[in-house]
Image (tube, rainbow, N blue to C red):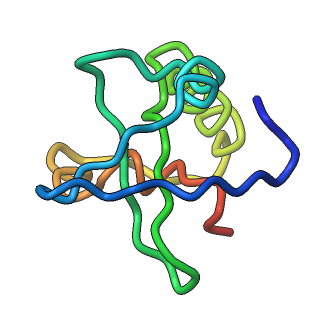
Amino acid sequence: MVTSVVSIRLKVGPKGQIVIPKVFREAYGIKEGGEVIIEPTDKGLVIKAPLDVKTLMEKLKERRKNMKGVGIQAKLGDLKDVDLEDEFNEDIP
């Protein structure tokens, strides 16, 4: 993953489209026909690659391990309105 701060100016096409430079697509595993997440923030828009299944499963296992003994008993339907991408956003404390 890229750790240095880089800024690149991109042209916006007539339909609001931009092209993510190849170096970034490769670094973040964004493939043709794949999906990205665009997230509005106070400082502007953030474009992120969605979590792959393996990473998501690791985060779920870690969270479950950390919750042992908390005494939370889940019921069917408790998570129907939870967005997992927001739930595991590392920007949120």
Q: Position of residue 72 (x, y in %)?
A: 48, 53
Please identify the quarter of the rendering in which residue 11 is found.
bottom left
Horizontal side of residue 36 vs 51, given as left or right: left
Q: In this picture, is 16 found above or below 51?
A: below
Horizontal side of residue 45 vs 2, given as left or right: left
Of residues 21 and 53, the one drawn nearer to the viewer in this rendering: 21
Of residues 34 and 55, the one drawn nearer to the viewer in this rendering: 34
Please identify the quarter of the rendering in which residue 7 is found.
bottom right
Q: In this picture, is 79 found above or below 46?
A: above
Q: In this picture, is 1 found above or below 82?
A: above
Quadrant in which the C terminus appears: bottom right
Q: Residue furthest right?
A: 4
Quadrant in which the N terminus appears: top right
Identify which residue is drawn at 24% across, 47% down. Answer: 75
Of residues 17 and 92, the one drawn nearer to the viewer in this rendering: 17
Q: Position of residue 42 (x, y in %)?
A: 53, 86
Identify which residue is drawn at 41% across, 72% down. Answer: 40
Please identify the quarter of the rendering in which residue 36 is found.
top left
Q: Residue furthest bottom?
A: 42
The total number of labels drawn is: 0
Q: Position of residue 26 (x, y in %)?
A: 58, 17
